[in-house]
Image (spheres, rainbow, N blue to C red):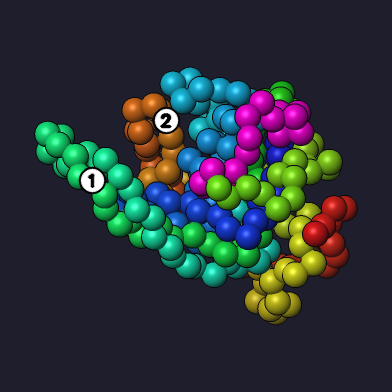
Amino acid sequence: MDTLLLRLIAPQQSWGVQSHYTIRDSGKEPSKSGVIGLLCAALGRPREADVADLAALRMGVRVDREGTLRSDYHIAQNVLDSDGKGTRDSIVTNRYYLADAAFLVGLQGDFALLQLLQEALRHPVWAIYLGRKAFTPAAPVWLPDGLQAGLGLEDALCRYGWITRRHAAADPAGVRVVLEMDDGMQVRQDVPISFAARRFSSRRVSTRLVPAPSALAMEVI
């Protein structure tokens, strides 16, 4: 088993999976559709491209710093009515985001594909952002030692050092990790089938606490 690690740190991140009309939500950690969208940007894949190979990767997230959920509002103009027969001049939309969060994301799968993704993250074709085009990473998503050959998802997430100096408090209970599991108790509707058609399937995840890293990673901010 092999795993690719990504570092997602930014002043603002948004990972919505249940947005409707004027309310745009954000989850407490990166969604699979958001991470795959990021990888597509790095690879230069257009919205209509097949993403089955990326969707098949098993994903996990370690929360090195819990973000603060906040919201702002935007005024959208020339918005299509729900019946599709007209438009409105302007509407107010409430959009949620995570402030000052830090995540270590792991993707487990075929080594050749992970190697391709590692190189794409190092030299992305298109700009990478964390949920919205205005939310750019505060540090490179690519990690020099991010390709963890021979390590499964759980081991790679547990063994890697803190990705930020301002990491989670030293809680004796450990650090929160969200793992994609066949028998997970939580269901997430965030596996992309087609970005162009906005079609998604579901997956199961499990949230657990793992021992906190004992040291900083090779590159931290």
Q: Which residue is mark 2?
A: 195
In the rendered structure, the answer to whether residue 140 lies left or right of residue 69 reads right
Q: Which structural element holds mark 2?
A: loop
In this rendered view, identify the residue nearer to me: 209 or 129.
129
Indicate the quadrant where residue 123 lies.
top right
Disc nearer the start of the sequence (1/2): 1
Q: Tell me, yes or no, whether the highlighted magenta stretch contains residue 102.
A: no
* Disc on res. 89: 1
Number of labels in the image equals 2
Residue 98 in the image: state x and y as whole percent.
Answer: 53, 62
Which label lies toward us, 1 or 2?
A: 1
Q: What secondary structure is the magenta-colored segment mainly?
A: loop
Looking at the rendering, in which quadrant would you find the C terminus?
Answer: bottom right
- Marks 1/2: CA distance? 27 Å
Residue 50 in the image: state x and y as whole percent.
Answer: 48, 21
Q: Are marks 1 and 2 in contact (CB under 8 Å)?
A: no
In the rendered structure, the answer to whether residue 20 lies left or right of residue 114 reads left
Would residue 112 be seen by someone viewing this image from the given angle?
A: yes
The amino acid pointed to by label 1 is Asp
Residue 179 in the image: state x and y as whole percent.
Answer: 56, 52
Q: Residue at x 57, y 64 (%)?
A: 99
Q: Residue at x 70, y 40 (%)?
A: 3
10 Å neighbourhood of mark 1: few (<14), some, or many (≥20)? few
Q: Tell me, yes or no, whether the highlighted magenta stretch contains residue 132.
A: yes
- Residue that lies at the very extreme toward the top in this rendered image: 49
State the extent of the magenta-drawn residues as a range.
117-133
Q: Which structural element holds mark 1?
A: strand
In the rendered structure, the answer to whether residue 129 lies left or right of residue 220 reads left
